[in-house]
């Protein structure tokens, strides 16, 4: 009998420089952000979130875009600048979320209210993961690593905007276990079934979520630790990095985990081949 059921939910798309996703080890921040003179054409990638049915309740991994990014369900430049709170962030990443496709809208379609969500687990606070946070202000717990929160506070004037989570009751957690590439993780239930594992590099407090059943089989959500399977298969780091050496070490760990025979699925947020659906383990 399976213990966990995972719903793969696509919540629209993000448009970025290809170098932001796949810039590799020598990419400049200017190039990854679209501020270089010889930038490539931008690419669209999906924004996925994952709803996990666990014996301890419902967990939602990331929240995707807010409806305010696309009030009419179509690309809307001014709405995005207002929603993101920054013309510069709009330049770096644009988004669109068709009507009915935000995380909360799709959960409602499944008969799930946002207040039914026991744990919202935020991988990191970049806009395509945290802009939709307020949809879940009445979820029972909204978990953010204290390291990530502090990092975002320090950089709130460029990369992050406090308004995405202002007024929310965030559960900031400190590392209480030692899994992962830097031996920093948070064991949610105290039995290592759900571990939020620090994989720094893209941001300081980025976490992967590893969910392990009683047979030792696990699902790994590595968020933006890589922008798809090709990232860990070919060891291509993203172009946005706060610490390149840490980012490479985190990616090597994602690769090692993804290749383990007990890994039932290893998924990023933005992998271009990820299709909506469900799986159990
Ligand atoms: Zn992202």
Image (cartoon, grey):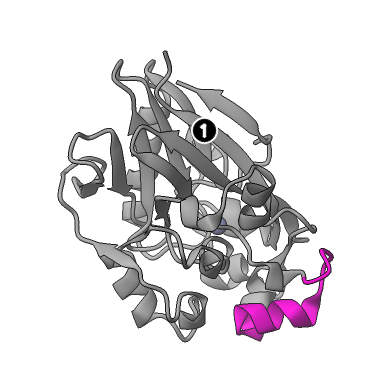
Where is residue 110 drawn, in percent x and y? Answer: 65, 42
What residue sits 63% from the left and 82% below the top?
88
Residue 25 visible in the picture = no
- For this rendering, which residue is in front, 241 or 28? 241
Q: Is the residue marked 1 within 8 Å of ligand 1, measured from its CB? A: no
Where is residue 19 drawn, in percent x and y? Answer: 62, 57
Residue interval drawn in magenta = 71-88
What residue sits 43% from the left and 81% below the top?
167
SS under mark 1: strand
Task: Count up the numbered dots.
Answer: 1
Left or right: 11 in relation to 231: right
Q: Where on the picture, by quarter, is residue 151? A: bottom left
Left or right: 87 in relation to 166: right
Q: Quadrant of ligand 1?
A: bottom right
Is residue 119 a member of the stretch shown in magenta? no
- Location of residue 115 with respect to 9 vertically, above or below: below
What residue sits 35% from the left and 68% below the top?
170
Q: Where on the picture, by quarter, is residue 214? A: top left
Q: Quadrant of the C terminus?
A: top left
Which residue in the protein does label 1 denote?
Answer: 6
What residue sits 42% from the left and 13% below the top?
1
């Amino acid at each position: 009998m399976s213990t966990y059921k995972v719903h793969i939910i696509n919540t629209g798309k993000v448009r970025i420089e290809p170098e932001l996703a796949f810039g590799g080890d020598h990419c400049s921040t200017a190039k990854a952000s679209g501020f270089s003179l010889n930038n490539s054409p931008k690419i669209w990638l999906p924004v996925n979130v994952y709803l996990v049915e666990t014996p301890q309740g419902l967990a939602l991994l990331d929240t995707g875009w807010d409806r305010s990014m696309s009030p009419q369900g179509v690309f809307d430049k001014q709405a995005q600048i207002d929603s993101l709170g920054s013309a510069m962030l709009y330049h770096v990443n644009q988004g669109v979320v068709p009507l009915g496709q935000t995380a909360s809208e799709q959960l409602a379609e499944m008969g799930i209210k946002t207040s039914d969500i026991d744990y919202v687990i935020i991988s990191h606070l970049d806009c395509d993961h945290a802009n939709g946070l307020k949809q879940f202000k009445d979820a029972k717990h909204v978990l953010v690593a204290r390291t990530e929160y502090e990092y975002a506070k320090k950089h709130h004037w460029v990369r992050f905007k406090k308004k995405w989570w202002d007024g929310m009751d965030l559960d900031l957690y400190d590392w209480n276990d030692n899994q992962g590439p830097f031996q920093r993780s948070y064991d949610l239930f105290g039995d290592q079934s759900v571990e939020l594992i620090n994989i720094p590099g893209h941001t300081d407090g980025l976490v992967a979520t590893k969910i392990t059943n009683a047979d030792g089989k696990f699902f790994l959500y590595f968020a933006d630790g890589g922008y798809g399977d090709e990232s860990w298969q070919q060891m291509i780091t993203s172009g946005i990095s706060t610490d390149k050496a840490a980012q490479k070490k985190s990616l090597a760990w994602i690769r090692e985990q993804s290749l383990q025979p007990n890994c039932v699925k290893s998924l990023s947020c933005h992998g271009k081949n990820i299709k909506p659906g469900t799986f159990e383990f």
